[in-house]
Image (cartoon, helix red, strand yellow):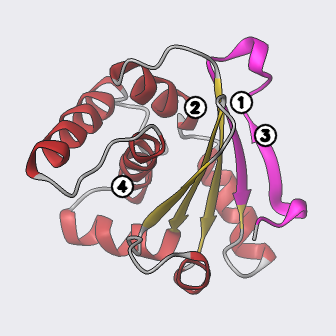
């Protein structure tokens, strides 16, 4: 479920960008949603999407939807095989890749476990989700390594843009 009142386009129009991200936030209450929107203003979401696509060899303009939500919504929406922190639903349209859904509480927990900032972890999972949307699979060691290599290259290129000032 992507609530229209919390949904907005992040970045601009397709003519200005290689990728357009429709961002929806549903953390369970308006105060949390607004606070999270403030955090996102300092992050390079579209840059991470564009860099991930380019490093994977995708150059045509695309759109995708990013939903930042909570664990409960993830559990309601996810299929049995989906990961708890992020899942994707590929689109049937060629230029619309589909949806990336990420649980913010899980991002915060994982960031603490790995000694990353939550901002870094969010962008890392966004890159991971985009790779799944374009067909990458981490169920084999080779697929996992390919995804990690691209994600790390994207994060290295985004250095300084992954955490708020």
For disc 1, the neighbor class at 10 Å (few under 14, some 14 to 19, many from 20) is some
Quadrant placement of the N terminus: bottom right
Q: CA distance from mark 3 to mark 2?
A: 11 Å
Q: Residue under circle 1?
A: 11
Residue at left offset 40%, top offset 29% = 52
138 with respect to 52 (left or right): left
Q: CA distance from mark 4 to mark 2?
A: 15 Å
Answer yes or no: do the residues labelled 2 and 1 have beta carbons within 8 Å?
Answer: yes
Query: Which one is in front in this view, the residue at disc 3 or the one at disc 4?
Result: 3
- Does 59 appear above or below 36? above
In the rendered structure, find residue 91 and report the number of the disc placed on it.
Answer: none
* x, y percent for residue 128: 37, 47
Mark 1, secondary structure of its residue = loop
| Range of magenta residues | 2-24
Q: In this rendering, would 4 be left or right of 66?
A: right
What residue is shown with label 4?
121
Report the Cα–Cα distance between label 4 and label 1: 20 Å
Label 3 close to label 1 by CB (< 8 Å) = yes
């Amino acid at each position: 479920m992507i609530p229209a009142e919390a949904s907005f386009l992040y970045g601009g129009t397709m003519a200005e960008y290689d990728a357009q991200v429709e961002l929806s936030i549903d953390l369970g209450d308006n105060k949390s949603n607004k606070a999270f929107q403030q955090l996102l203003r300092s992050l390079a979401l579209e840059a991470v999407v564009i860099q991930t696509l380019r490093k994977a060899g995708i150059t045509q303009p695309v759109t995708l939807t990013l939903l930042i939500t909570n664990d409960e919504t993830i559990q309601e929406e996810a299929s049995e095989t989906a990961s708890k922190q992020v899942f994707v639903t590929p689109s049937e349209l060629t230029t619309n890749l589909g949806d990336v859904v990420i649980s913010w509480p899980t991002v915060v927990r994982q960031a603490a476990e790995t000694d990353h900032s939550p901002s870094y972890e969010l962008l890392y999972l966004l890159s991971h989700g985009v790779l799944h949307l374009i067909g990458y699979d981490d169920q084999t060691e080779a697929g996992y390594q390919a995804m990690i290599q691209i994600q790390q290259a994207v994060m290295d290129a985004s250095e300084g843009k992954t955490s708020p000032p």
